[in-house]
Image (tube, rainbow, N blue to C red):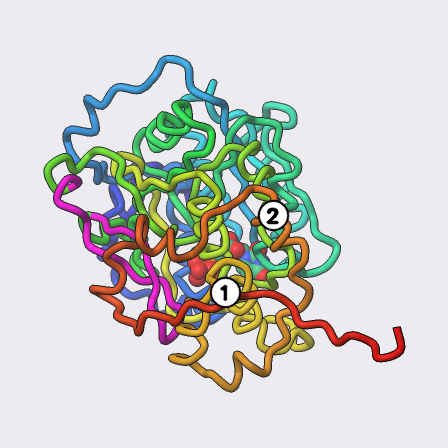
C-alpha cells in the first residue's frame, strides 16, 4: 500500500476504517506479537502529520540560540519494524537538524528477521547521511538497562535522549528538553508523554501532567498532582521526584559522573527509581517540560519473553535500588509488599553502587523525602521508619 502523509489515520485521529475481514487473522497475530495493532502501523506513513497537543503558549516560548547537541538512543527487543522506524523518523523530522546529531539503535538480541537486513536498509534509505543512524547489536540479551548503557557509551553528542522503540515525537520536541540542561549540566529533563492508542494509533494527551512517584506496596510508578505554581504557569518546566522511565534527556557528563545505571539491574524494572533517586540525592535535579511532547504506545501486556534463568529479577532489581538508596525507608517497601520474597532474594554485590553514593557525598533518603517527594506521604502513606544505623557485622576470628 502506498503510504502518504495524509493516509489514515489523518493527523493522528482514529482511522474509522471498515474492519478488514481478510486481515483479521494477520492483525490478531501481529497484535499478540507486539501488544499493539502492528498491522495498522504498517499502513501509516512514518512521517504522518500529527496533532499539535502543546499548550498554545508553547508556540511563543523562547530558547537559547546556542543549545547543546543531542543524540537519540533507542534500545529495542523484538520491536515491530514500522513503529521502530517511525520513532527515529518522526523525532528527526521535528527536531532542528543542527541539534540532533545522531541516532543510535541498540538491538537487544532480537530474533525477528525484519530487524536485521531490512532495518539496515530502511535506515540507509531514511537517513542517507553517513553515520547518522547506527544499529549496535548486543550479542546476547542484556535487558533494557544495559542496552541503554551500551548505546549511551557510543554517543558523541553532549546530551543523550533515551527513548522507547515505539514513540512519535511531537512538534518542536527537542529545544524545550535542552534549554534547562544548557543552564545546568546536572539537570535532567523529561518530555510530557502522550498516548498512541494501541488499537487505532490515535494520538491524545494523558492529562495536564503530574509529578512522578511510586506506591509503597507494589513499587509501581505513580503520580503526584502538580503544585499550584505549575498550575499558574502551565508551560514552565516543573520539578518531578521520579521519571516515568523510558524517556529522558541528560548530559553524557552527568550520566557518567553518576556511574550510569547500576549494571546489575536485569531486563526491565526499577531503573527509573535508581536513576531518579541518585540524580536528586547526588546534587542534580529533574524536570518535566510541558512543551516537549513525545507520544508512546502503552500496552496491556509484555509481548516478549524474558530469560528463565534470571529468577525473580524485578524483585531483585527493586531490592538493589532500595538497599543502596533508600536507607531505613527500604523496610517500608519490604514490609508492605511481598515481604518473604524480598527477604529471600539475594540482591548481589552492591559495593560499586555504594561507593558512588559515598564518592559523590550524596544526600540520604530522608533528605529526598523531605525536600523532593515532600507530599508523597499525603498520597501514599507510610509509617515513619525508625532511624537505624546501617553497616556491616564481621565475625572476628578467635585465634587472631
Ligand atoms: N527493551 C529492551 N530489552 C528488554 C526489554 C525491553 O531493549 O529486555 C526495550 C523495548 O524494546 C523498549 C524499551 O526497552 O524500547 C522499554 O520496554 P517496554 O516498552 O516493553 O516497556 P514499557 O514501556 O512497557 O515500560
Ligand atoms: Mn514502551
Residue 77 in the image, given as x and y percentages of width and height: 58, 58
What residue do we see at 42% from left, 45% from top? 280
What residue do we see at 39% from left, 61% from top? 37
For label 1, the SS is helix
Q: How far apart are labels 2 and 1 at the CA level?
A: 15 Å
| Left or right: 295, with 281 as reference point | left
Q: Quadrant of residue 344?
A: bottom right
Res. 22 visible in picture? no
The disc placed on residue 322 is: 1
In the image, 332 versus 119, the foreground residue is: 332
Query: Please, which residue is most extreme toward the front here?
Result: 399
Per the image, is 373 magenta? no
Relative to 314, residue 83 above or below? above
Give the labeled residue for mark 2: 356
Chain part drawn in magenta: 209-230
Is the residue marked by circle 2 packed among few (<14), some (14-19), or many (20+) residues within 10 Å?
Answer: some
Residue 17 in the image, given as x and y percentages of width and height: 26, 57
Query: Please, which residue is most extreme toward the right here?
Result: 399
What residue do we see at 27% from left, 36% from top? 237
Query: Please, which residue is most extreme toward the bottom here?
Result: 340
Is the residue marked by circle 1 packed among few (<14), some (14-19), or many (20+) residues within 10 Å?
Answer: many
Residue 299 in the image, given as x and y percentages of width and height: 38, 64
Per the image, is 218 magenta? yes
Residue 368 in the image, given as x and y percentages of width and height: 37, 52
Amino acid at each position: 500500500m502506498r503510504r502518504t502523509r495524509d493516509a489514515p489515520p489523518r493527523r493522528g485521529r482514529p482511522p474509522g476504517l471498515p474492519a478488514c475481514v481478510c486481515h483479521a487473522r494477520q492483525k490478531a497475530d501481529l497484535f499478540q506479537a507486539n501488544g499493539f495493532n502492528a498491522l495498522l502501523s504498517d499502513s501509516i506513513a512514518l512521517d504522518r502529520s500529527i496533532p499539535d497537543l502543546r499548550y498554545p503558549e508553547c508556540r511563543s516560548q523562547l530558547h537559547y540560540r546556542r543549545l547543546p547537541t543531542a543524540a537519540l538512543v533507542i534500545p529495542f527487543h523484538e520491536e515491530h519494524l514500522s513503529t521502530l522506524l517511525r520513532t527515529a523518523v518522526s523525532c528527526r523530522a521535528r527536531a532542528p537538524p543542527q541539534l540532533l546529531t545522531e541516532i543510535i539503535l541498540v538491538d537487544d538480541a532480537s530474533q525477528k528477521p525484519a530487524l536485521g537486513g531490512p532495518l539496515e536498509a530502511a535506515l540507509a534509505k531514511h537517513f542517507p547521511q553517513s553515520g547518522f543512524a547506527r544499529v549496535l547489536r548486543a550479542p546476547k540479551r542484556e535487558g533494557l538497562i544495559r542496552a541503554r548503557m551500551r548505546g549511551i557509551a557510543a554517543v558523541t553528542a553532549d546530551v543523550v535522549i533515551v527513548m522507547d522503540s515505539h514513540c512519535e515525537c511531537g512538534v518542536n520536541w527537542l529545544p524545550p528538553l535542552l534549554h534547562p540542561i544548557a543552564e545546568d549540566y546536572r539537570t535532567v529533563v523529561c518530555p510530557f508523554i502522550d498516548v498512541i492508542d494501541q488499537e487505532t494509533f490515535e494520538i491524545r494527551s494523558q492529562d495536564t501532567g503530574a509529578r512522578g512517584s511510586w506506591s509503597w506496596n507494589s513499587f509501581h510508578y505513580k503520580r503526584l498532582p502538580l503544585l499550584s505554581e505549575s498550575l499558574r504557569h502551565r508551560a514552565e518546566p516543573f520539578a518531578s521526584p521520579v521519571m516515568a522511565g523510558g524517556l529522558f534527556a541528560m548530559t553524557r557528563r552527568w550520566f557518567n559522573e553518576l556511574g550510569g545505571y547500576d549494571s546489575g539491574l536485569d531486563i526491565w524494572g526499577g531503573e527509573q527509581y535508581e536513576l531518579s533517586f541518585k540524580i536528586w540525592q547526588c546534587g542534580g535535579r529533574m524536570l518535566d517540560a510541558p512543551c516537549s511532547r513525545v507520544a508512546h504506545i502503552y500496552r496491556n501486556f509484555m509481548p516478549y519473553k524474558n530469560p528463565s534463568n534470571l529468577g525473580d529479577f524485578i524483585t531483585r532489581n527493586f531490592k538493589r535500588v532500595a538497599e543502596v538508596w533508600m536507607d531505613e525507608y527500604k523496610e517500608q517497601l519490604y514490609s508492605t509488599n511481598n515481604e518473604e520474597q524480598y527477604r529471600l532474594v539475594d540482591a548481589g554485590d552492591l559495593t560499586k553502587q555504594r561507593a558512588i553514593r559515598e564518592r559523590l557525598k550524596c544526600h540520604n533518603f530522608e533528605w529526598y523525602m523531605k525536600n523532593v517527594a515532600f507530599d508523597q506521604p499525603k498520597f501514599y502513606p507510610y509509617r515513619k521508619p525508625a532511624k537505624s544505623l546501617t553497616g556491616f557485622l564481621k565475625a572476628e576470628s578467635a585465634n587472631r
